[in-house]
Amino acid sequence: MTIGNQSKFGRVLCILSLFAGTTLSTSTFAADLTSLAPDKYKSAPIIIGTTATMPPVESVDPATGQVIGIEADLARAIGKKLGVNVDIQNVAFDGLLAGMQAGRFDIAMSGLADTVQRQQAMDFVDWYVSGVQLIVPKGNPKKVTSLETLCGHTLGGTRASTEFRRMEAVAKNCGSTETALVATENSPSGLLSLKAGRVDVFAVNFPSGMSYVQANPELELVPGQFKVVVRGVAIAKSNGGLRDAWQAGLKAIIDDGQYDEILKRWGAPDAAYKQATINAGTE
């Protein structure tokens, strides 16, 4: 992260701390949390839908077929605190939030930005912060350095993602400069489009960018994060009991150090957001 972006990142954290949604006190978590989850989860697991194509946030372990990564570890740690099982299912991103709202999943989890628009239809329990990262071909032939240098290029992002909406906003503000948009099914397919020359820039969220370029040496990462936001898991507004229990479990793993251990394990301590808020997004 550049110095300028570090400063912006710090300001965002300060704003979120001042204006964030509901928070809980540390003393709340001295008690046993196993009575907090709604009764139906005592006999059936919490079903979590995710799109496991964004290492280290979430991906599929090829050896076991299990979803692994930052969010998967956080979810399993919270499940243990609540005394319930979690079943993490890998699904297509563009159906993830609709599937949660339709009751196919109890929780949607995929590096989701907590936005004011999304809050109208669902609640968020916030657990990390990150911004947009831009991936370009090796050598950066289009000389991309920021969101302000994207006009006139072909921009890509995962369909229905916040990153793609950022690219849409850029294109809208380019005036008469033609700026094309390409929506892909997921980030890996977007990287293939980038390598094939069908897009000039592909947008992902931190900290996935570094993992992608390490696995694809013909690509590189534009330095810095842009438009840093708070991210979390989405839960139906009708499932307030699960929302509140999940928030309590998150605060408990923050307090006992597991949260820091998980982010450090996956190389993303800079993504830490220890407020355990509900609906703290302000954009």
Image (cartoon, rainbow, N blue to C red):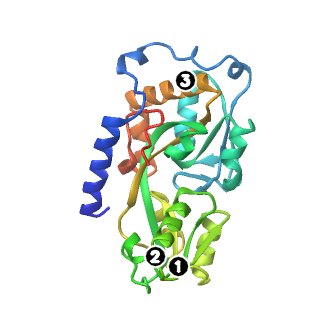
Residue occupying the point 61% across, 82% down: 198
Q: Are marks 3 and 2 in contact (CB under 8 Å)?
A: no
Asked if disc 3 and disc 1 are in contact, CB closer than 8 Å, the reply is no
Quarter holding the N terminus is bottom left
Please name whichever residue, 6 or 263, is drawn nearer the observer in this view of the structure.
6
Q: First in sequence, mark 1 or 2: give its number.
A: 2
Question: Measured along the vertical axis of the image, is residue 223 above or below residue 276?
Answer: below
Q: Residue at x 54, y 79 (%)?
A: 154
Tell me residue 34's x, y (percent). 57, 16
Q: CA distance from mark 1 to mark 2?
A: 7 Å
Is disc 3 placed on a helix, strand or loop?
A: helix
Check disc 3 and report the residue beneath it: 245
The answer to whether 243 appears left or right of 27 in the picture is right
Q: Nearer the viewer, mark 3 or mark 1?
A: 1
The answer to whether the residue labelled 1 contacts the one labelled 2, judged by CB atoms less than 8 Å apart, is yes
- The residue type indicated by label 2 comes to Cys
Q: Amino acid at mark 3?
A: Ala
Measured Cα–Cα span from mark 3 to mark 2: 44 Å
Point out the residue furthest to the bottom here. Answer: 141
Q: Mark 1 is on which residue type?
A: Thr
Q: Is residue 129 above or below residue 249?
A: below
- The crowding category of the residue bearing disc 1, from other C-alpha atoms within 10 Å (few below 14, some 14 to 19, many at least 20), is some
Judge the density around disc 3: few (<14), some (14-19), many (≥20) Cα neighbours within 10 Å: many
Tell me: residue 177, above or below residue 250. Answer: below
- Residue wearing tag 1: 179
Q: Residue at x 70, y 29 (%)?
A: 45
Q: Is residue 26 above or below residue 48?
A: above
Depth check, mark 3 against mark 2: the one in front is: 2
Q: Which residue is mark 2?
A: 174
Q: CA distance from mark 3 to mark 1?
A: 44 Å
User: Residue 87 at x, y = what percent?
Assistant: 69, 36
